[in-house]
Structures are given as structure tokens and as C-alpha cells.
Image (spheres, grey):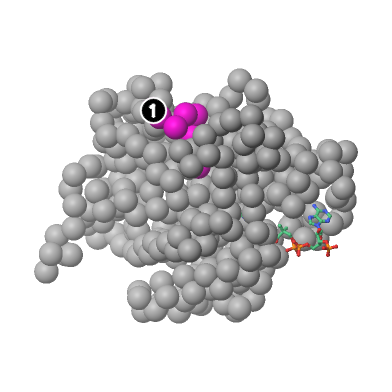
Amino acid sequence: MILNRLRRVVISGTGSHLPEKRITNRDLEGMVDTADEWIRQRTGIIERRLAAPEQATSDLALEAARRAVADADLAPADIDQLIVATVTPDHAFPSTACLVQHRLGCRQVPAFDLSAACSGFIYGLAVARTAIAAGTARHILVIGAETLTRFTDYGDRGTCILFGDGAGAAVLSRAEEADDDSGIIDTHLAADGSGAELMILPGGGSRLPPSPEMLAKRQNYIKLEGRAVYKNAISKIVMLVNESLERCRLNREDINLIIPHQMNARIIESAAKHLDIPLEKIFINLDRYGNTSAATIPIALDEARRENRLHKGDLVVLVAFGGGMTWASALLRW
Ligand code: UT7
């Protein structure tokens, strides 16, 4: 059967990079009509990171990439392809991936950006896995990097409390050991553009190019239907985890760790309750970084490793829901 000839794909290295400057809930109290307690209770967020004025998405991505490549015991010249998942690229073009490819010192390999908002990193993982499994690449660098604060309206209390900047990266490699069952077992990607307006950056693209009117209407900032996203996110996360387990004929008791997209602690806790999975098996770091869109999962994955929350043989689920709307999951044997 053809599937048996496809190569197994493992995560061979991870890295992350967060800018130093923090925006605390107290800082936000001085900007909009909000309160530390409200933000903590409704979102679980305590602080987020803010890129320095001279830092763009590629700068954060580059640092995370360097760490992931070193962690995989590889050199930039070993990388066969780069994917940067982002909705906040340095420029509309060239791609952020091309900037990283050059500055990291990679060969002239394929490099491209992938736009799937908060699901972007898992989308990247699935694309990279397919290329490696098919034999067209051996090591692919998948980066999730964002500078969402550049597009956040610090006059809108419904959105400015949520977002932060950061980057995470993973190297995907063709597995070497034949008798090992580690690697990516299952991925699932989906999208529904009928919900495009729920999370949108309306201005700055070809629909609404930059103009004084566009700026006056603050259309250069992220708009969000928080409540609608909230409800959709819970049901999609529950569905993604259940369907992935079903496809792989596994039970929820088999899961060792779930790394969900970090959007709101209440969303994550409610999904865990519906799934009947204890919170100890869910990785949460949004209290420190808020929502960094495509970067939340690779940052969390890197932290989970460094905090010794991942052990050989563990069953790990990555799951995300976000703008598009898009949603995605990946099941891994560590
Ligand atoms: O990665 C995908 C990106 N999307 C998201 O991360 C968003 C997911 N959604 C959420 O996280 C939540 O919906 C929010 C945190 C955005 C809002 O929480 P909520 O519990 O859904 O509140 P709500 O929008 O239903 O608003 C409840 C009240 C409203 O006041 P009234 O109309 O009841 O008087 C809001 O005006 O809370 C008010 N409110 C605030 N109050 C204090 C909204 N934002 C704030 C705030 N501080 N920052």
C-alpha cells in the first residue's frame, strides 16, 4: 500500500522568542475603561509582550528559527524549506519567509508565508509533513510569528486586552529509526469563509487600500466579534479532538498533553470540560503572553518541552481555531 512507503515525520527541534517589553493589565487600565480583575476573570490573561519599535515579525521569527535549528542539531544549510505562518508579515511582499531564509543563511530553498490566522502553525505542520512524507524534503522549518500589537486598537477595550507579539518554530524531519513510532500521526485542516467578518483586519489590503478615510475609521486595526468567536471556538476544539481520536482509534485517556491555541482560558477550560479531560493535561501559558495568533502553539510547544511536560511516547494533541474562519488539529506521538 502506498501509505506504507511514505516517510514518518518527527519534530526534531523547537525554539521560541518573545520580545522583552510587557503590557500588563494595569497598563491597559490606563488606556481604556477596563480592570485587571475583569481581564483576568474573562480571559485569564495577565500580561502580553510588545515588540520594540525597530522589531518586525521577521526579527522575532528569525530568533525562534535559530533556536529551533540549533535544538535539532542542524545547521541552516540543512533546511530544505521554510514556512512562516503569519497574518502580520513585515510586508505584503516579499514574504516574511524569504527575509528569514536570507538572514538565517539557508540555501536557495523554497520559502513562503502561510495565512491561516490562529490555525497557521498547524496548517504549516500539515503542509511540511506532506512534503517530507512524499520525499521532496528532509528538514522543514515551520515558524509561527506575529506582531499583532501593530494592528491592535488601544482605544477598543474588546480587543486590546487580548493580543501580544511573539514567535515559535519547529523543525520537522524525516524519521530515522525504523523501530520507533514517534511522529505526526494525524492532521486535520478546515476553513469556512462565511465567518470571515468575525475576525478581520479590514483595511490595508486591496479591498480597502490605505487612505485618510480608512485610517479615520480605524480600519487598520483588528475587528472582532468576541462572543461569536468564543462559542464557535469551544465547539470546534471539542469536535477536532474527538474526531482525531476516532480516526486514530484512540481514547481520550490515551492523551498525555493537549496544546491548544491560547485565546482565552475560559474557552480552553470549557472545551476541556466537554472533552472530560483534566486541566493538568492542558498546556496554558496565555496568562503571560495573551493571544499571539499563529505563534501561540509553537511557543507553547517549546515551553512544554523545556518544562519537561513532554516525554518519549507521549500522545500530544495540537488544536486551534481562528480567523478565516479556520480550524486545525494535529496528533503526535512524541
Ligand atoms: O484567536 C482568535 C481571536 N479571538 C479571540 O481571542 C476572542 C475570543 N473571545 C473572547 O475571548 C471573549 O469574547 C472576550 C474576552 C473578547 C469578551 O468576553 P465576553 O465574556 O464574551 O464579554 P462580552 O463581549 O459578552 O461583553 C460583556 C460586557 C459588555 O458590557 P455590557 O454590554 O454587558 O454592559 C462589554 O462592553 O463586558 C464589557 N467589556 C469589558 N469590560 C471591561 C468588553 N470588554 C471589556 C473590557 N473591560 N476589556
- What residue do we see at 34% from left, 46% from top? 172
Where does label 1 land, which residue?
Answer: 94
- Residue type pointed to by label 1: Pro
Residue 181 is left or right of residue 289, and the answer is left
How many labels, in total?
Answer: 1
Horizontal relation, residue 319 to residue 50: left or right: left
Residue found 23% across the figure and 53% down from its top: 133
Q: Quadrant of the C terminus?
A: bottom left
In the displayed structure, 243 sits above or below 91; it is below
Q: Label 1 CB, ligand 1: below 8 Å? A: no
Q: Is residue 281 visible?
A: no
Kindly identify the residue that appears in the image at 22 percent across and 42 percent down: 137
- Residue 178: percent from left, percent from top: 22, 57
Q: Residue at x 24, y 48 (%)?
A: 132
Q: Quadrant of residue 249?
A: bottom left
- Mark 1 secondary-structure assignment: loop
Q: Quadrant of the N terminus?
A: bottom left
Quadrant where ligand 1 appears: bottom right
- Locate residue 292, reporting x and y percent: 60, 45
Residue 89 within the segment the image draws in magenta: yes
Residue 20 magenta-drawn?
no
Q: Is residue 200 visible?
A: yes
Residue 28 horizontal/vertical position (percent)? 82, 41
Residue furthest to the front in view is: 213
- The percent position of residue 122, horizontal first and vertical second, equals 43, 54
Task: Please determine whether, in this image, residue 86 is positioned above or below residue 227.
Answer: above
Q: Is residue 180 left or right of residue 57?
A: left
Q: Is residue 260 above or below residue 31?
A: below
Range covered by the magenta-colored residues? 87-94
Give residue 155's quadrant in the image.
Answer: top right
Badge 1, how many Cα within 10 Å: few under 14, some, many 20+? few
Dominant SS of magenta comes to loop
